Image (tube, coloured by chain):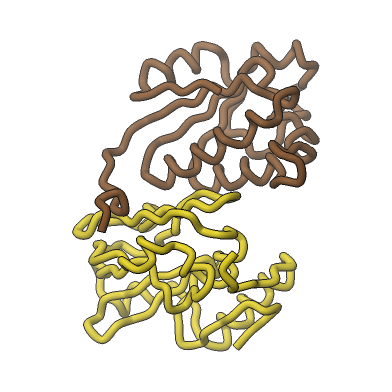
Chain colours: A brown, B yellow
Amino acid sequence: MSEDHYLDNEEKTVVFIMTSGPSTPQRCATPFYLGSIMASMDVDVHIFFTMEGVRLMEKGVAENLTAMEGGKKIIDFIRDAKRAGVKLHVCQPALPGYKIDDSKDIIDEVDHVARASALADLILQSHNVITF
Amino acid sequence: MECNGCEFRPELYYDDEYQIWVRREDDDTLTVGMTDISQTIAGKILHVRVRRPGTRRPPGKPVATIESGKWAGPIPNFIDCVIVEGNPDVLENPVLLNSDPYNAWIARVEASAGAEAALDTFLTGDEAYKGYCARAKNEEIECHRKIR
């Protein structure tokens, strides 16, 4: 049997920087799918939404968005990732440009509304940084 | 037994969300698999990976990971246990989890505090059937076990 069937990776921290948003829906499912896999492999996974990525964390957006026609809603990918243990951070400085008020417009799945310095810390603490 | 087309086996033990089933073996190890509800939600399963035998898994640390076309995530674990083995048939042919979820077990584990204590937290029999049926109906889950 292939060795690939057994998992024995070390625990690591990975941060995904998500800059893609609703204008490129085909780029909006994979980070959550990959994040779910990595979290279920004991990786400490953080997704930090900045630039247009913050719009995925705005109420009413992911609920009505699919990566492919007829596909699963992005909100369901987000919820799968959360259940697997992925942590979601939204870039506070990016919100005003998209007229998003973090006191009322952000979906409940978000763990932290964070400053850019929080992303800097995550990057410096992580074993890998992946951008989408 | 069935509910909404979802197969249920009253002799098995289930977590309170009916994601996994557990069976106690004669040697006191525990066999773990996916419920019919879980395999239906996942869709056609493409890949399964189990933690290496001998690895200790505390509650909350998954026993295995599953990938399907529309879902990826853990096989949740509620037991402090050590992995004994993965099911080689399932590892080679993951779609067995879709077609025969109660025979296609995923992993066998040894509970650190013994099987009896580990199963205390699980549901079985009529109580489990009631909850299983409620979840299938509330979430409108209709199971299909054909290979897709």
Nearer to us in this view, A113 or B95? B95
Q: Position of residue B31 (x, y in %)?
A: 34, 74
Residue at (59, 80) in percent of width and height: B7
Residue B31 lies left or right of residue B100; in this view the side is left
Quadrant, the N terminus of chain A: bottom left
Residue A52: % across, % down: 69, 18
Direction from residue A73 to residue A120 in the image, left or right: left
Q: Is residue B147 above or below residue A94?
A: below
Q: Position of residue B110 (x, y in %)?
A: 25, 69
> In this picture, is A107 found above or below B81?
above
Q: Residue at x 35, y 68 (%)?
A: B89
Residue for point 75% across, 11% down: A97
Task: Give whichever of B148, B13 is nearer the camera.
Answer: B148
Q: Quadrant of residue A93?
A: top right
Q: Is residue A66 left or right of residue B69?
A: right
How many numbered circles does the render carry? 0
Task: Give whichever of B44, B121 is nearer the camera.
Answer: B44
Tell me if residue B61 comes above or below residue A88 in the rendering.
below
For the C terminus of chain A, the quadrant is: top right
Residue drawn at 64 percent across, 22 percent down: A20
The extreme left residue here reads B54
